[in-house]
């Protein structure tokens, strides 16, 4: 049973999460500390936490740190019980730590107080649907892409040290041609540095090919899942599978947690930050938010500036008004974020309880 955090009798549980244990502290609506508990990160431990919380009576919410990492299991367990879970950011408060010290229970108490003060209000991602599947697949694909890049860079570095004849044979080839040529190199006994080099080049080329096939498979699965989740998003100009996946991951399976297009823009770090004082009215660049989502919006804008006629017309008009290219890109990223928000919300309508 939950109750509003404005009720002085309601209890708020703050949880500091770690890999093996979670620390929990209970406070009431007046800020008084009621108790604490450390539990293991197991199903039995989560149940212990719930039973312990019930001993304080009516509780309003659980403020959980790291709901997308160490706190994910606990967050999902509590949500399945119908309890309110609030995502709490891990604060950077070195000055306060220097004065008051730091331990897990102090961090848990801080999490509870953030909920009580209204500083923490975010709803965690549910992570139990198609978007979570997209996130997992994208993580696998990203690691394969990174490994493939490392392989081809290392392969080209080795070619630089090859003898003149082999270097002349391989150096001018494109990446696909280079990989094919290296994979076909004759490998004999490893009795000389050059024979060993040919062996290494062939092995690395085959590894690059294996990673390429793995990436293609991941991409096919991601395309299927993204089209099922938001077909209109994948079809939008300049938005491919990778960008659509990143946007869906930013929203999460419970897209209703993002309550407005302005909130989504802030999540992506494309909303201007007020920096006014007195008679000076100005805004500054937002360097926060999800930087991967921000980079995805940047890619969409660059594609549209090159190929999308309405975007090109907008750029020409804004240049005539005196804006720089960098400023125009920031404006366009904000516009694209608004467009993507409405597409995803259209694809995932509000639950009946919120309509």
Image (cartoon, grey):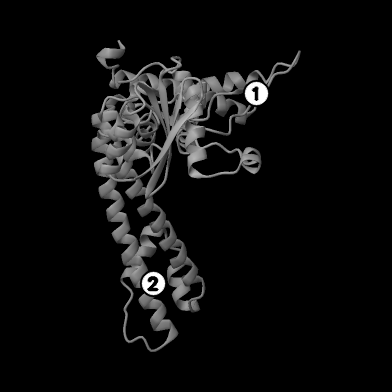
| Left or right: 347 in relation to 266 | left
Q: Which residue is mark 1?
A: 323
| Left or right: 248 in relation to 34 | left
Residue drawn at x 29%, y 60% is 210
Using the image as rendered, state which of residue 188 and residue 250 is in the foreground: 250
In the displayed image of the protein, which residue is found farthest to the right? 279
Q: Position of residue 209 (x, y in %)?
A: 31, 60
Badge 1 density bin: few <14, some 14–19, many ≥20, Cα 10 Å: some
**The image quarter in which residue 47 lies:** top left
Q: Is residue 116 in view from this perspective? A: yes
Q: Is residue 83 above or below residue 163?
A: above
**The image quarter in which residue 43 lies:** top left
Using the image as rendered, state which of residue 18 and residue 104 is in the foreground: 104
Q: Is residue 324 above or below residue 101?
A: above
Q: Position of residue 344 (x, y in %)?
A: 34, 23
Q: Is residue 309 in view from this perspective? A: no
Q: Position of residue 29 (x, y in %)?
A: 47, 20
For mark 2, give the secondary structure: helix
Q: Which residue is mark 2?
A: 201
């Amino acid at each position: 049973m939950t109750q509003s955090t404005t009720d002085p009798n309601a209890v708020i549980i703050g949880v500091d999460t770690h890999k093996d244990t979670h620390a929990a502290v209970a406070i009431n609506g007046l800020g008084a500390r009621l108790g604490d508990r450390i539990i293991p990160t197991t199903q039995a431990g989560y149940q212990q936490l719930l039973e312990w919380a019930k001993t304080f009576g009516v509780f309003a919410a659980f403020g959980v740190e790291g709901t997308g990492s160490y706190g994910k299991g606990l967050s999902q367990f509590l949500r399945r019980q119908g309890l309110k879970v609030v995502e709490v950011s891990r604060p950077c408060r070195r000055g306060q730590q220097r004065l008051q010290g730091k331990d897990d229970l102090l961090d848990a108490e801080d999490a509870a107080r953030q909920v009580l003060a209204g500083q923490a209000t975010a709803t965690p991602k549910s992570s139990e649907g198609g978007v979570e599947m997209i996130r997992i697949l994208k993580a696998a694909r990203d690691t394969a892409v990174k490994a493939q890049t490392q392989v081809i860079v290392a392969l080209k570095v080795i070619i630089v040290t090859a003898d003149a004849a082999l270097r002349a044979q391989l150096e001018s080839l494109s990446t696909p041609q280079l990989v094919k040529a290296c994979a076909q190199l004759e490998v004999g006994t490893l009795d000389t540095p050059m024979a060993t080099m040919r062996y290494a080049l062939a092995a690395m080329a085959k590894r690059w090919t294996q990673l390429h096939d793995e990436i293609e498979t991941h991409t096919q699965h991601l395309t299927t899942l993204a089209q099922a989740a938001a077909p209109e998003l994948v079809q939008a100009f300049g938005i491919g599978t990778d960008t659509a996946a990143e946007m869906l991951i930013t929203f999460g399976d419970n897209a209703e947690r993002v309550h407005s297009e302005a909130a989504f823009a802030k999540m992506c770090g494309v909303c201007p930050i007020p920096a006014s004082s007195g008679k000076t009215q100005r805004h500054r660049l937002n360097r926060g938010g999800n930087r991967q989502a921000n980079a995805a919006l940047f890619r969409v804008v660059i594609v549209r500036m090159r190929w999308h006629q309405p975007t090109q017309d907008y750029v020409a008009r804004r240049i005539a008004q005196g804006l720089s290219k960098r400023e125009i890109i920031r404006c366009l990223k904000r516009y694209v974020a608004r467009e993507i928000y409405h597409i995803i919300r259209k694809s995932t309508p509000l639950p009946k309880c919120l309509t």
